[in-house]
Structures are given as structure tokens and as C-alpha cells.
Amino acid sequence: MSIRIKALTKSPWVFHASAASCNNCDIEILDCFTPRFDVERFGVQLIGSVRHADAILFTGVVNKKDIPLVKKLYEQAAKPCLVIAVGVCACSQHMFRFSYNVVEPLDKILPVTAYIPGCPPKPEAIIAGLVKALGTLKKK
Amino acid sequence: MIVFKTLFLYLVFPGFLFAASVGMLAGWVERKLAARIQYRVGPPWYQNFLDIIKLSGKEIVVPGGKAFTFLAAPFFGLAASSLVAAMLGEAIRTREVSFSFDLIIAVYLLIIPAVSLIIGAFSSQNPLASVGGSREMKMVLAYELPFILSIATVIIKTGYLRIADVLNYQLSNGSIAASPSGCIAFIVALLCIQAKLGFVPFDAAEAEQEIMCGTLIEYSGLPLAIFRLSHFVLLFALPLFLIILFLSGTLSIFSIIIKYLLILVAIILIKNTNPRLRIDQALRFFWKLLTPIAVLGAVLAFLGK
Amino acid sequence: MNSSERIKEKFGSKIENWQEHSKNRIYFTLDKAYVREAADFLFKDLGLRLATATASDLPAGFEMIYHYSDDKTGVIYSLRAFIKGKESPEIDSISTVFKAAEWIEREIWELFGINFKNHPDLRHLLLVDDWPENEYPMRKNYKKPHEKKEQDKC
């Protein structure tokens, strides 16, 4: 495993993008940085600009208007960048799958690496999902 | 031969490599102390090194045109800050390399990292970056004035413009910070250092939540790593500058390390206990509160106290 | 005299139904032609604030309800206006009185299909701009164009 990938797994910077979510998953992502769970000891930092990101955490359902914006956001991230779908709305559209404004789930638009189900997922689940997503990098 | 020696001083010790390593460890102290204050466990001591290695391996994305300015700006900042680190480190180690007026040259070189940040921000072709760049310009205008006034206090007291002479003066007459005017000037300079390093409460230029990392929003990969390295080198050089100017009563290795750690802890405590100031509040703070205090210090120094 | 009495005095017999739903909620019905005049009166003379406007799809037609809030006493006056018939429903726009009503009426138009006469800028607010014509999602007879048979079997 190259030193590049090894350093990436030891210091993943996450960017958090909410595509029409109810913000519950967003609050749980912020919970991961509180003293009870503290992911900063693994090197994870929540950064403000998508160009600095190593993993984009998408929450919420992607509706028709959002599709070009979500694609543009992924293109702006510096590769290698993982896409992680947090919350069951991002994984499979949940109860909104019959709604008039919702067309495609997230993994038909972007290459999703990890799915973290839950409404909202517990911070333990988010940490486990992030670790699994980083594990796929190690295997390549 | 002299070329090799100079390159060694500039690049290895006490220049770029040594300053960057000490700066990254100091950065770790800052993150760990902040974490402990917030009742968390912080990152391990090698975290900053891993961050830089990881950033060097990422793709470099250049927005729009103007690629040369965009890519070259961070290197100028790193070059200037390493030069200051080499100059100050060598001056405090052996006082013979100091040349005339190098105090003023050090002050000039310390402005260049901020200017490179501004140039990088404006060549990003991003409105948020230009907001960050304009805020950084205002911050430079704000903190340079009391900073130079506090250095003027030192110059008035010692009567010398050479770092070696300032050090010799303090070794024979005691630290400048022990006198009233020196104490005032030291506190003013400490707050100006806080702004120079871009720490809360004066980090309006790179506010994470408001303008999405302001000046550095379009940077990725190696240029971003160079900017952060320049920040770490400044974290080594600026407290050292304060020690040279105000606290060189005794100059053994042990006392230098203790003083460096004390200044670092003071900066970190101010950082963690204060909210971020708006840019107009910061300007008011530096111009209306600190500048008169610095002038008072200079006047006291002139009167001989 | 308080706002309820002034409304009753101004509109008199045009009020078809006055219902005090609870201490702070009063519903009254007017014919749809008087909607703009009522908005003018309630805002300028009585000082009420337009809180929001809602629409419902009923079997006989569409019903618009405008909710006006009296911030001094805490009472909400809800003005009902009924539009008969499902073919091309129309009603006057109140955006000349309230600038905020522009966006409210744009949303009601794109989801229900109610045309607002004299609206300055009637276009899509929440849906995409190339949403198919004459597809109004909030109507009861709306069917999604693409079939999702497999997902329905859960």
C-alpha cells in the first residue's frame, strides 16, 4: 500500500453536504466531533471547503433540481475522494421514494463507496461506516 | 564552502526542515491542548506530519486562468518564513551572524507570508476567496501598527538595530520584559502575534463556518500543503522573535524551550477561550485599544523606565 | 371596536360564513371576487399581516385560504375563497398589496394549477423549469409519469 493511501487513511478530512435533508443526519455527523465520540483522535477534521476534502458525506434525498449541483460538487473535490451516503434517505430515498420530485437515488448519480443506514444513524454507525470506507482504499 | 553552509542553515537547521518540524510539533501541542480543554482526547503527535504527507499526494486543481500566480504564491510565503526562521534561529544560537539592521529586515520578511496569502486568495477567481483576501488585508493593516510600535519600544530602550546587540544588551541588563515599558510592549506584541498566526479571536480571514475557508478555498494538494507548512514555520519563528526581543535575560537551551512553551500556552489559552471577532471589531481593537497602549509603552521607554 | 367587528361592518352581507373555531382562530368565507379588496382593507386599515396562504383540492373545486395574523392580540383571521370547477381555476392575485404573496402564489400555481390574474412573474419556484405542462403534483388525480411497479410491491 503506497504511502499516499496510508496517509489518506490516517488523516481523512470530511466535507459535509446536505442535499435536501431534514438535518437530523447533519446533527448526528456533528455529534461525532463531540467529546463523547471524538473522531479527531483518528485525524478526522471537518473542513469548510470541498477542495480540501477526502470524503464527502452526503445526507438527504437528491431531488430533480439538485442533480446537476451534486455532480458539480463531486467534480470540485480533489481526487482521490470518497463518497459516503449517510442516512437512509441518501442510501435509498426511504419514505420519499414515491414523491413527485424525487427521481434517482444517490448511487445512480455518483460512485458511492459506503452506505450508512439509519434515521438518523448513530455516531457509532457513522464512525464504523467511515472506517469501512477507508478500508476499501487499503484493499486496492 | 560558504554556499553549502548557507544552504544548510536555510534548508535544514535552523531553517526549513527544523522549523517545520518544531512548528508541526507545536501545532500538535495546540490541538492536543484544545482537545483536553474540551474534555476530549486529541490527535497523536505525528498527526500534522501525516496531514502534510496526505496533502502532497492529492490532485492539484487550478481554477480558471492565472495558473502561475496561483501556484507560485504559497512558495513565496514558505521561502520568506523559512528565511526568517533561519535568521532568528542562527542569531539566537551564535550571535555573530547578525548583520546591521537585521531587526528591520526580519519585520519586513514577516509580512510576506500574509501578502502571499492575499495574492493566492485573489488569484483564485472565487468571490468567497476575495472576501477572505480583503479581510486579510484589513487584518494586516490592523496588527502591523501596534506590532511595529512595540518593536520601537525595544529599539528605544536598547538603542540598537542589530539582533545581536539587542541580545547582548539583555544578557547584561536583564530582560526587557522586566521593565514596565517592556512589559506593556510584550503584551501588545503577544496579541499581534495571535493575529499574525491567524488564530481565533482574529481569524476572520479564514473563518471556517462563514466563508468556507476564505482565502484557501480553491487550494488543494501540494500548494495547500505549502501554505500549511509556512504556517507551521511561522509558529516556530514568531514566538522565537518575541523571545529575542523581550525575554532574552538568560539564553540557555533549557530556558529558551521553557519560554517558547510558555508563549505557546498563552497563545493557545487565548485561542480557546475567546469567540471570533468581526473584522470591524478587530480593527477597532487594534487601532483604538492596542495602539495607544503601545504608544504609552514607547513613551515610557523614552523616559527611561 | 376590535377587528372582528370592523370586518363584519365593512363586508356585511358578503360574508357567507363566520366561524369562531377557537379563542384565537376565526374563519370567514367571502366570494372570490372580493379577495383583493379584502387584502387591501385587512392590511392597510386594520394592520393585519399576511401569515401565509394555503390551497386545498376539494371535490367541487379549489379552496384558497388566506391567513391574516393580528400581532397585537394574537388572533388569526382566515379568509376562505372558493373557486368552483376544476377546469382552469382562476383567482385575483394579491401581490399588489403584499410583495411576499408573489412567491406564495408561484408555489400554489406550480403545485395546484390555480392561475393568479395580474401576477407579475408566474414561473416555477420549487420544481425544475422544464417540468411537464399541466402536471400539477398536489392535485388528487396526479399520477407520477414513470412507473415504479417493483418498488410498490414491498
Image (cartoon, grey):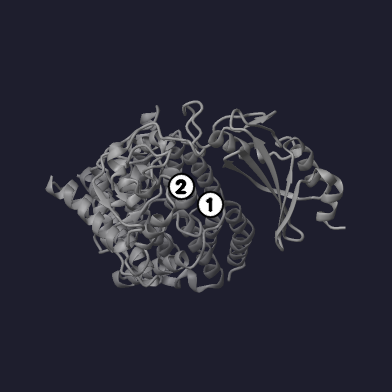
Picture quarter with the N terminus of chain B: top left
Q: Say which amino acid is labelled 1.
A: Glu
Q: Is residue B89 visible?
A: yes
Q: How far from the left and from the top, in percent, is residue C38?
A: 78, 42
Q: How far from the left and from the top, in percent, is residue C71?
A: 74, 57
Q: Are marks 1 and 2 in contact (CB under 8 Å)?
A: yes
Q: How far from the left and from the top, in percent, is residue C136?
A: 51, 33
Could you tell which of marks 1 and 2 lies nearer the N-terminus? Answer: 2
Frontmost residue, B239 versus B216: B216
Which residue is labeled 1 in the image? B144
Image vertical order of residue C86 relative to residue B26, above or below: above
Which residue is labeled 2 in the image? B111
Q: How far from the left and from the top, in percent, is residue B230?
A: 35, 49
Frontmost residue, C75 versus A113: C75
Frontmost residue, B221 versus A105: A105
Instruction: Write the residue at 30% across / 40% down.
Output: A78
Q: Pinpoint the chain carrying mark 2.
A: B
User: Helix or strand or loop: what does disc 1 sit on?
Assistant: helix
Q: Is residue A92 left or right of B263 when viewed as pictured? A: left
